[in-house]
Image (cartoon, rainbow, N blue to C red):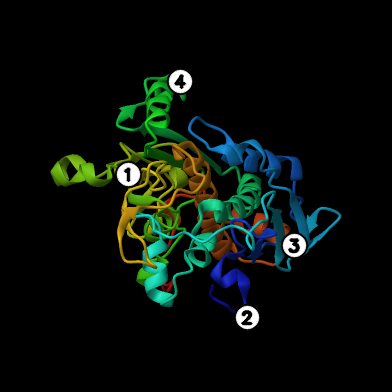
Amino acid sequence: MSHSLSPAADGLRWSTAGESHGPCLVALLEGLPAGLPLDFEALRSGMRKRWEGAGRGLRAGFEKDHLEVLAGLKKGVTLGSPLALSVGNSDTRIDELPNLKAPRPGHADLAGVLRSRCRDVRAVLERASARETAARTALGEVARQLLGVFDIEVGGRVLEVGGVADDGRGAECWAEAITAARERGDSLGGVFEVVIDGLPPGLGGLEQPVDRLDARFLAALASIPAIKGVEIGLGFGGAGVPGSEYHDGIRQGSGWAGLERLSNRCGGVEGGLSNGQSVILRAVMKPIPTLRHGAPSVDLAHSGDTRATYERSDVCSVEAAAVVGQAVCCLTAASALRARLGGFTLAEMRQRYAALGRTESPADWPDDISGRG
């Protein structure tokens, strides 16, 4: 997490702490404007969606994700100081749960013990667990409410599970495949999409590689456990399309500054900057590597071939990953908006947003950056 004397200059900054079976997860969000009222029922509703969907495991039946505010609010309104939240764990047996004798391929287990040179797999998996995403989801729901002030909406959907595309029935079209995977002790991955509508043009940056908005969105999605592929717009499909068919033509219309596009193959970001179109992102989630019958592994204490140790797990978490994907994209979009507008209070952000030039004409702008042209 970066630090700066001017939070608005860097947008939002966030970090999380906590283990899968520890007392709680802690989430810290810096850079929020003062004066943003938070709807806690909406926060809790957004967090509950993480547990919905076919293929979730036993933990979905008892985990409550109890949310508490530790700092940063007065009477439900942000103070402009860091916002600290805690998400309680219902299963807090970190000190009693047994170690894993055989690391699970696909998890951080083996890489983690190779790093620590200690056979304590539990010390690795507790933080590497996707349980951490509950904290990021909480922060993402806060960011969603900031975006909502400016009519920016973030949505998502699952496109595919186990190689089966959505046929319009939602989770029903994957129920048979998920049930079959559960019965044979297997797991399934899939593909989900996140769409962000209403971003003004010019968010992000081109001055340094890390400023580029597309890189930031793609990195945010790739940071979710089990995500192994990300794309924006036409993405990998653009490899087989000639430039004459790929790029999004410009014409007079009803968009920002009286301009609009003929298509959106670029996915709403050009040259590292938002261009006023919908930002369209997709991510590929691998099958969860915890398998009931285990995968080939090695007993770390005795150096013998064995099967990986089984830990309680889901069969399929693609729908949950889509919820987390929305959360991290909310954080990324809100951070870029915060950096662009600055200001300490929400009222200042509103004023600066109104001055971005939505209804202006490019013909009225100077033709030289010095303003003398």
Q: Please, what is the three-letter code of the amino acid marked with disc 3?
A: Ala
Q: Mark 1 points at which residue?
A: 233
Label 2 vs 1, first from the N-terminus:
2
Examine the image and state in which quarter residue 252 appears. Answer: top left
Identified at 73% across, 66% down, the residue is 80
x then y, percent, for residue 158: 43, 34
Does the residue at mark 3 contact the one at mark 4 (Cβ under 8 Å)?
no
Give the numbered dot on residue 34.
3
Examine the image and state in which quarter residue 300 appears. Answer: bottom left
Check disc 3: other Cα within 10 Å, few if <14, some if 14-19, many if 20+.
some
x then y, percent, for residue 333: 51, 54
x then y, percent, for residue 64: 70, 43
Identified at 36% across, 61% down, the residue is 299
Q: Name the residue under label 2.
A: 5
Give the mark toward the camera: 3 or 4: 4
Check disc 2: other Cα within 10 Å, few if <14, some if 14-19, many if 20+.
few
